[in-house]
Amino acid sequence: MDYNLIKTISIQDFPNHASYVYPTLSATFSDALRNKYIRQTRLKIVDNNADLEIEGEITGHDVKGLAVKEDSYASMTELSITVKVRYTNNKRPTDDLNQSFTSSRPFSNTRTLDEVQDELIPEIINDIIDQIYNATLGNW
């Protein structure tokens, strides 16, 4: 990364617009995204007028059945989260992107969503954040 050209980044809070609202998802995701850029770069986080800007929203938080058995019941269930991201590079506009990122984790249907989401959501968030980081700064 050219730190002579790119010095600052702003990362806005990602509101949760998914139909299912997990109360802490927005804050947890937004904080983890900021922490990734703080840990992995020398960019200074600012509120506005940044060289790089990241904003978006959580658009999906879904549960669906997988691996249907012969009795027509799912033996596995999948939790997925989708985040829409708008990335603006004010120094190199050709790097801008507007993209959705999704990650999911399966779990046994013998467990409820309430039992697994505190375990699975951090894994899913970390995966989505890695995807976002690679899409925005992976070419540096």
Image (spheres, rainbow, N blue to C red):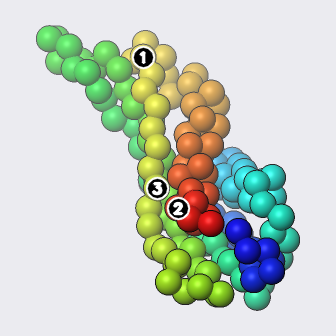
Q: Amino acid at mark 1?
A: Ser
Residue at 50%, 28% (x, y): give it: 113
Query: Does any portion of residue 110 appear in the rendered image?
Result: yes
Residue at 80%, 80% (x, y): give it: 4
Would you identify the image quadrant in which residue 74 lies? top left
Q: Which residue is mark 2?
A: 135
Residue contact at pointers 2 and 3, CB within 8 angstroms: yes
Left or right: residue 7 versus residue 109 is right
Q: Amino acid at mark 3?
A: Phe
Residue 2 lies, in percent from the top left, at: 73, 74
Q: Which residue is mark 3?
A: 101
In terms of secondary structure, where does tag 2 sit? helix
- Earlier sequence position, callout 2 versus callout 3: 3
- Earlier sequence position, callout 3 versus callout 1: 3
- Earlier sequence position, callout 1 versus callout 2: 1
Foreground mark, 1 or 2, reads: 2
Q: Disc 3 versus disc 1: distance between alpha carbons?
A: 24 Å
Q: Is residue 49 above or below residue 23?
A: below
Residue at 35%, 20% (x, y): give it: 76
Residue at 63%, 72% (x, y): give it: 54
Would you identify the image quadrant in which residue 57 lies? bottom right
Q: Which residue is mark 1?
A: 108
Left or right: residue 137 versus residue 100 is right
Q: Disc 1 versus disc 2: distance between alpha carbons?
A: 31 Å
